[in-house]
Amino acid sequence: MRRPAVYYGRLYYYMKKPKFQVPLEKLIQEIPVSLPSVGSNVIVSGIASDSRKVKPGDLFVALTGTIEDGHQFIGDAVQSGAVAVVGSRSISLPNLPYIQVSDSRWALAHLSAAFYGYPARHLTVIGVTGTDGKTTTTNLIYHLLKTAGFRVGMISTVNAVIGNEKIDTGFHVTTPEAPDVQRYLAQMVAAGLSHVVLEATSHGLSQQRVEACEFDIGVVTNITHEHLDYHGDYEAYRTAKGRLFTSLVETHTKSHSPPRAAILNRDDISYDFLSTITAVPKISYGHHPDADFRAVEVTPEAEGISFVFSSRDFHMPIKTRLLGEYNISNCLAAMTTIVAGLGVAPGILQDGFDTFEPIPGRMERIDMGQRFMAVVDFAHTPNALRCVLDTARNMVSGRVIAVFGSAGLRDRAKRRMMAEISAELADISLLTAEDPRTESLEDILSEMAEGARSRGGQEEETFWRIADRGNAIRFGVELARPDDIVIICGKGHEQSMCFGTTEYPW
């Protein structure tokens, strides 16, 4: 069977392993700029926004970041073989086309989509955003759709899944850059997939990495305290998340006419704001009595949770191996998306919960024969830490020993908040490193210690400062007695730790 092809003018390109040769003039057709005469015959074979990754034939897009300005590296990009440059500053390049745009990030997204033939227009695209629970909800939607027989792909902060192929999307949690996102979408189209679930972080939305992804359905888990270092305040952070929902009306008409919907959490403080700015049909989930889809008869169990997925039209029992009552919200979000958003009969999805495996680094039990319980979780926000510690308390009859840190160059206010929460809910708190970056780890731990003390914590009795994360975990394990739980939070699935500007394997 021949592989799908994308048509570009007179050229056809197979996309199993995309390798394109696209005229520059084709790429900029939807960008309101004129092409310099020197670029009329330029052929582009790739798009890059990092000068260190430029290959011969690439179009280099210079981005202005919070730390570095990509325009400073145009010379490096040209030396590496860039055939054209896009930027937002007024620059003249000899014998090389330079295209000035008002917003180079917007341009990067649309150029990347054009380069791969606007793949999202051939897919039903489900976007998932929120502070906590994004990855779990994204994986749930993907798994349930796959179990129901859909040809579905996934792009999360952990990996991209295209058919049987899994691609690591990076050391740290963030939405991949636009060229990577569009390449993954193109590979999905080539593989014959019909749906994709895309996890959209606030940075990914704010930095337009998911611009031109042509979302059909937007899903929110919650919007709580996080990333205020970047966004400035809660309102700006909420607005960044809201971009997923305002973009739904901008999606191009697709030949397969997928539904449009916004799936909103009726229990969350974001509900009123998101329902106001959303111009497509809104469907709500939650425990709230006015929610369209609810969870009733909730029963926490040793190996998971059972509840009844309920609406005006049906009541269906669900049992999941996910731990923690907060995961009910993630289950509701996934089920509501598929049942109400896509119109799938709920009974088809029931078996999917039986085969859904817990996600690495999300309330992941570690069993090596020890007499106490050990769990790894990604909780790195005040709300998430509160939820997992509440869950941990109900999982054992002994003590809760929490190991966690707070990242450098990130939301500073949450350092104290998280230590306060742990001092209140855990028996022992071990404060340690979590990507201090260029900040002083000692200063970060000092701020956290102040928070613990403000809630009655006693240093070296109920909380310790242990800078080395490995040593902190070892100390927690040594303290643990039968019936205790050691819960290690913050890193989850991540495979590196950032000290200074270097990512070290972790």
Image (cartoon, rainbow, N blue to C red):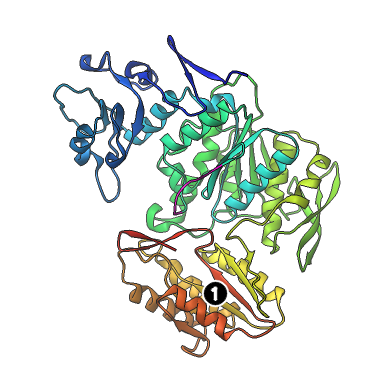
Q: Position of residue 368 (x, y in %)?
A: 64, 72
Pick the quarter of the image with the N terminus: top right
Q: Which residues are magenta?
A: 166-172
Q: Is residue 392 above or below residue 120?
A: below
Whether residue 341 is visible: yes
In the rendered image, which quarter is residue 189 located in?
top right
Magenta residue check for 169: yes
Residue 201, image x and y in percent? 49, 47
> Left or right of 377: which side holds 57?
left
Residue 470 point in image, percent of width and height: 46, 74
Residue drawn at x 67%, y 53% is: 330
**Residue placed under numbered mark 1 in the picture:** 421
Quadrant in the rendering for residue 95: top left
* Position above or below: 504 against 145: below
In depth, the one of 230 and 468 nearer the eye is: 468
View extreme (top): residue: 10
Q: Is residue 469 magenta?
A: no
Residue at (41%, 28%) from the top-left corner?
110
| Numbered disc 1: secondary structure | helix
Is the residue 313 above or below the residue 121 in the image? below
Q: Indicate the quadrant containing the C terminus: top left, top right, bottom left or bottom right.
A: bottom left
Question: Is 305 situated left or right of 212 in this image?
Answer: right
User: Alpha-carbon neighbours of circle 1 within 10 Å: few (<14), some, or many (≥20)?
Assistant: some
| Amino acid tagged 1 | Ile
| Residue 3, image x, y percentages | 57, 21
Q: Looking at the image, which residue sits at the far front? A: 1
